[in-house]
Image: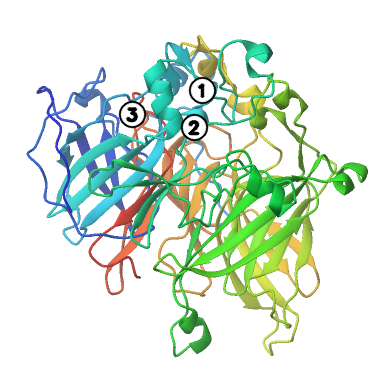
Amino acid sequence: MRMTAMQTTAAPSKAMRVVSIGRLVAPVVYGGLCLTAACSGLCPAAPAPRPRPHRLGRWSTTALHARGAGISTPGGVAAPTLPSNEYTADFSPTSASKRDWASAYVSNLPEEDYAPEIEGVVPPELKGTLFRNGPGRIERGGEAYSHIFDGDGMVTAYTIDDGKIRVKNRYVRTDEYEKEEAAGTILYRNTFGTQPKGGWTRNLFNVLQKNVANTNIIYWGGRLLTLWEAAQPYRLDPSTLNTMGLDTLDGRLQPGMPFTTGIKAVDKLAVGVVGDPLTAHPKVDEPASADLDPLDAERGRRLVSFGYRAKPDIGSLVSGKGVFASELTVYEFDEEFRTAATQVVEIDGFAFVHDFVVTQHYLIWFQNPTDFEPALYVAGEKNPAQLITYDEHRPTKVHVVPRDPTDPTRTRRVLELPPCFVFHHARGFEEVADPDGQPGREIITVDSVVLVRFPEFDTLTRPRDDDGSALKALNFSEVPINQLRRIKLDLGTGVASQTMPRPRSMEFPCCGNVRPRAPHRYVFGACAAAADTNNPFQGIVRVDCETGEEVAHFPGPRMYTNGESTYFAIVAATVVTTCPFAHPPTNRLTRRASLRGATGGKR
């Protein structure tokens, strides 16, 4: 694999520090690089181009070398309020810490290629290329985007070999991005509030949205794909990061928006408006070994994904469930990206389903008690995320769907939880409730991050001329806290129950290397420094969901960790983990990534 170098002027190098915490190895970046990682595939390491210095920015390296802190708290024992007296719980609008946090939300316009300065040691076994994707540009033509999630996708590649790291980043050049680049202004409507100037008179009936390609990146079947859940993926060249174009997976996905008329013939005539989206949270499903389950092993390793589409439905409207019903199309791909299985799942009412859970026999979606009223969107006044409403009087429904719809021993079930909102899941696993394997007493355990209510996006948008003031004014105490819950779904009794191992605010949960089909005990994620209040994420935490023990590392009082962890085995019985990369205040927000290396990605 080759990488293309870029010529730039000399300046002080960016610095990267590597720290160890138990089973974790966490690269911590100074100077504005990365936040997140998520494992999806592997490729050989690239030869490093000529080293290039890079300007650190307005924060000095010395100022960012803050002392980190760690905590280890047994289950049943209250954690310290803060990890040390260098940290603060004060993120009020006038605080210095709030200004630090808000200053991170700036565009990262340069496309670069350089070797960062590294403090510490990169594990010598670690070889390959880590890809990360997230919003890179959050303004255009002097106008701020209304929300960070509307930002243009930027992919960064970290090539790791022989203890060295090479960094390269490129924007995903979607059709909409190229047109806005040429015009120098915002031309398209976005999900979270960004839209062209002119108000409703400019945007009336303009329902087409921009594909920002900014949420996730995967490497599967020889393709490097950027994902955004309301449209189709864009494919990149893994060597150069050049955009190769929209990828319909050999014609299986129709270009267009997450919408269906419910009539296939009509949908086919509306290409560009009606489309087949792909979730930003696909799952790599690892089968059990042949000696444990021959049939599971024969099915092989798969990428399981789905696409959500809203469908106008008179029945839902009459029954008070809103204008739309929901259609989920499930895809299971083999390692050559051939379709191995597919099915369509219908759900009554509108379903805000950002993530899902895959186990050996089931697919699981949490249907949050939300509705979507499209009138103001069609009228050009507001965008989709601003029009989602939350009904605290309805339960959260958990849809448990057999992966094999022809399996006579398993049926679809709908369980209920008290009203809550779920964005992300760590993992799920199946077990039998009774030692004798009594039929029908299957229990599925799911670890998820749960909010007590929907975080209304309309309250989190900012004006076009925002200089950071809107972000500084955000009151975290008014935003629902993200907390880890262990949820038990008893398929025999139809009862769903939940416990909270720790009250600490955390997000982007994952479980690391777990034996396929086996139960897991630990969940990792980004977390707040404050023990039980809602503040920006400043650490990396491991929670024992059985005992409630938590172990956390906090890189520094001016460092923030907004992303997932990546785990991969490099030697038998050895786990090495690249954790969410911390960032200083000058960084942009980024979200997810993919790793490719010489081992082919198998665990």
Q: Which mark is residue 536?
A: 2
- Disc 3 on helix, strand or loop? loop
**Quadrant of the drawing holding the C terminus:** bottom left
Query: Type of residue at label 2?
Result: Pro
- Disc 1 on helix, strand or loop? loop
Q: Is residue 75 visible?
A: yes
Q: Earlier in the sequence, mark 3 or mark 2?
A: 2
Residue at the far left in the pictured view: 50
Q: Is residue 119 left or right of residue 536?
A: left
> Comparing marks 3 and 1, which lies closer to the viewer?
3
Give the residue pinned by disc 1. Answer: 91
Q: Is residue 137 visible?
A: no
Q: Which mark is residue 29?
A: none
Q: Is residue 536 left or right of residue 384?
A: left
Give the residue pinned by disc 3. Answer: 584
Q: Are marks 3 and 2 in contact (CB under 8 Å)?
A: no
Residue lying at 23% horizontally and 56% vertically, measured from the top left:
128
> Comparing marks 1 and 2, which lies closer to the viewer?
2
Q: Mark 3 to mark 1: distance in Å?
A: 16 Å
